[in-house]
Image: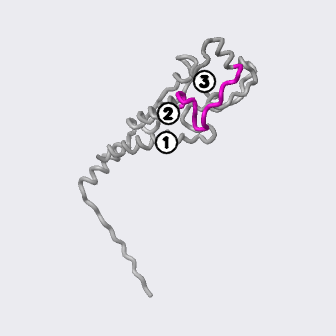
Amino acid sequence: MLQRYCMITIEVNDRSVLDTLNRMVQGLSDATPVMADLAQVLASESERQFASQSGPLGPWPGLSDVTKQMRGLRGTWPGRMLQVSSAGLAASVQTAHGPDWASISTNKPYAAMHQFGGTTSARSMIPGKAIPARPYLPFNPRTSEITPEAQATVLDVVNSWLSELAA
């Protein structure tokens, strides 16, 4: 039995659909505005983690008794764990963005130790001390995945932006 296949081509010449697609293509060629918004979303999520003293791994581990004692002598305990000074880690989180990227970062030399945990160096004030991870950036330090809260907000911002492009 011989079967015949035929190709069907449908061409749509709807000016409003084409105009919408063209606006979207132009908007997608430089996503700088939405990337600026996304950088702010990431910074806001970081602020939330500082405020709640928790991250993707749950509540931050408490401070050691030695750290509490040292901070008590300086008058900074009781208080927030990673927010000892106005120029500290929380205040150092900064945003950046471009046409196809968004980021947050910090320039504090001790930032990675708090995000990922680790052991202090021999030259530290507390040499050889294990410091637990207290993730303050909105991603899981074990998997590098963005937190579910940040992901939901990022998707909301992107969907809103795409809707605006299509309008």
State the quadrant of the N terminus: bottom left
Task: Tell whether label 3 touches label 2 (CB within 8 Å).
Answer: no
Q: What segment is highlighted magenta in the picture? A: 49-66
Task: Tell whether label 1 touches label 2 (CB within 8 Å).
Answer: no
Q: Residues within 10 Å of mark 3 (few under 14, many from 20)?
A: some
Image point 63% across, 40% down: which residue? 142
- Three-letter amino acid code of the residue under disc 2: Glu
Closer to the observer: label 1 or label 3? Answer: 3
* Mark count: 3
Task: Locate residue 49, reporting x and y percent.
Answer: 54, 31
Q: Secondary structure at mark 1?
A: helix
Label 2: which residue?
45
- Three-letter amino acid code of the residue under disc 1: Gln
- Three-letter amino acid code of the residue under disc 3: Met
Label 3: which residue?
81
Question: Of callouts 2 and 3, which one flags the residue occurring earlier in the amino acid sequence?
Answer: 2
In the image, residue 162 above or below residue 4: above
Image point 40% across, 36% down: which residue? 32
Nearer-the-camera pick, 148 or 28: 148
> Does residue 144 appear left or right of residue 130 in this picture?
left
> Does residue 54 appear left or right of residue 25 in this picture?
right
Per the model, the C-alpha gap separating discs 2 and 3 is 17 Å
Question: Of callouts 2 and 1, which one flags the residue occurring earlier in the amino acid sequence?
Answer: 2
Question: Of callouts 1 and 3, which one flags the residue occurring earlier in the amino acid sequence?
Answer: 3
Residue 165 badge:
none
